[in-house]
Image (cartoon, coloured by chain):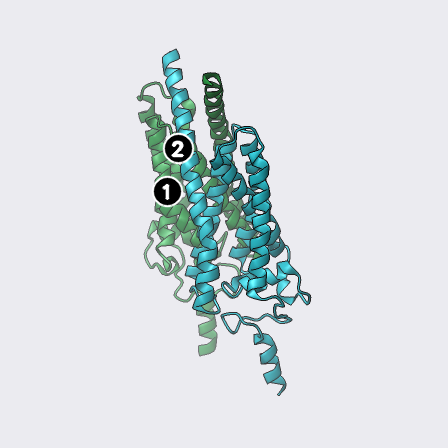
Chain colours: A green, B cyan
Amino acid sequence: MEGREETWEIHSHPYIPRDLDLQGFVPGFLSQSAIIGVYGFSSFLVVSLVWFLSGRLSKLPKIDRLLMCWWLFTGLTHMILEGYFVFSPEFYKEKTACYLAEVWKEYSKGDSRYAARDSGVVAVEGITAVLEGPACLLALYAIATRKSYSYILQVAISLGQLYGTAVYFLTSYLEGDNFAASSYYYYAYYIIANASWVVIPTLIIVRCWKKICAAVQVQDKRKTKVR
Amino acid sequence: MEGREETWEIHSHPYIPRDLDLQGFVPGFLSQSAIIGVYGFSSFLVVSLVWFLSGRLSKLPKIDRLLMCWWLFTGLTHMILEGYFVFSPEFYKEKTACYLAEVWKEYSKGDSRYAARDSGVVAVEGITAVLEGPACLLALYAIATRKSYSYILQVAISLGQLYGTAVYFLTSYLEGDNFAASSYYYYAYYIIANASWVVIPTLIIVRCWKKICAAVQVQDKRKTKVR
């Protein structure tokens, strides 16, 4: 009996692989729709605030205002959500309905490496939360105040996001790509939720890359003329 | 007796942790000085060739010629050395004195995760060999032909090298930082040999970042004047 109870306790989690040892696991309290609802609604509030405030700034083009919304949304996601994960190795033992622990209990259904504390995931999330998160807020400020480092900073952060996502997907692939509780969670959480951090950084890199090349080209021509 | 022989076969490698299972391991044939000598001498030849040929190109500043040397050296290292590792999961079983297998048999003394095929290491090396290696050769070409994308490309590759090195060190730290055969190999291979890929990319990023900001600033001023 004791042996059986122990086995039950070790495996009493909804994640795959089934033999993942998560002693002390406490199931989530909030429903999927509540978790996504809170994230969606607070993101909507934050983005609306930036859109409204940036509209009052002197003649910022709409594309810059849109980018400011993205940088605040992604920066806060990195710092708050991913920051909590990085510094809370035992989130799956959380006994209260702490929202941030709920997020990762739920997301681990799409990728159990979060609950299992896979070193590749923690390394990428650590860089994202500690370095890229604050850099996103700096990018917001740089766009609002038209700093000359605005484009190169946006390229740097976006490249970091792409590199992190590449390591994230590659390590999973190399380890057998078997960390999702079902194909629903695989596609909804692992693929679709991460897709924004592939598509949007790519678009930003293309845009800023062109802007930088154009600026360098103009300067090169001027130098040649001066000669 | 059989059990003992099996244990001997499993553990007959010079790497740490001692219980790392590398069945079929064949010890290296070349000495450390031979391995480093070949790498050093061929790098010297390649760098000298670039320095000599770039000197004949029209008025390239010395700093650009130096950067071209770096990009060829690091690009070939990524594509040949790291490329071999990525696509040779069984290099430690190599029965001949194949130079590239020897390199990784030797380097694994500083970090056994190479022989153990750690997914974080393979993911980072894969990105480095397949994407960054060819991009380094493009950077060499961009500098030689004064392309307008030269600075931003150099920043992009250097950021990738820094990100890769960060993931490389962080995952080792998170997994207990116990992969070196001795503290000599730890410092000589793991720390010192990797240090160039922290210091040089950082210097390149600082230089190109400033150049890009200066070019963008000049263009912004011109736009303001036109208004």
Q: Could you tell whether B13 is left or right of A38 in the image?
A: right
Q: Residue furthest bottom?
A: B1
- Type of the residue with mark 1: Gly
Q: Chain of mark 2?
A: B
Q: Nearer the viewer, mark 2 or mark 1?
A: 2
Q: Name the element at disc 1.
A: helix
Give coordinates of residue A142: x percent, y percent. 35, 30
Give coordinates of residue A27: x percent, y percent. 41, 58
Residue A45 seen anywhere in this rendered image of the structure: no
Q: Are marks 2 and 1 in contact (CB under 8 Å)?
A: no
Using the image, tell me which numbered label, if any, was put on residue A133.
1
Q: CA distance from mark 2 to mark 1?
A: 23 Å
B184 versus A126 height, above or below: below
Between A4 and A80, which is closer to the camera in this rendering?
A80
Q: Name the element at disc 2.
A: helix
Residue at 62% of width from left, 51% of height from top? B80
For label 1, count other residues whose C-alpha is less than 10 Å away and answer few (under 14), some (14-19) or many (20+): many
Give coordinates of residue B177: x percent, y percent. 43, 64
Residue at 48% of width from left, 49% of height from top? B164
Give coordinates of residue A103: x percent, y percent. 40, 50
The residue tagged 2 is B210
Res. A26 image quadrant: bottom left
How many numbered circles does the render carry? 2
Q: Could you tell whether B58 is left or right of A84 in the image?
A: right
- Type of the residue with mark 2: Lys
Q: Chain of mark 1?
A: A
B46 versus B29 height, above or below: above
Between A73 and B121, which is closer to the camera in this rendering?
B121
For label 2, count other residues whose C-alpha is less than 10 Å away and answer few (under 14), some (14-19) or many (20+): some
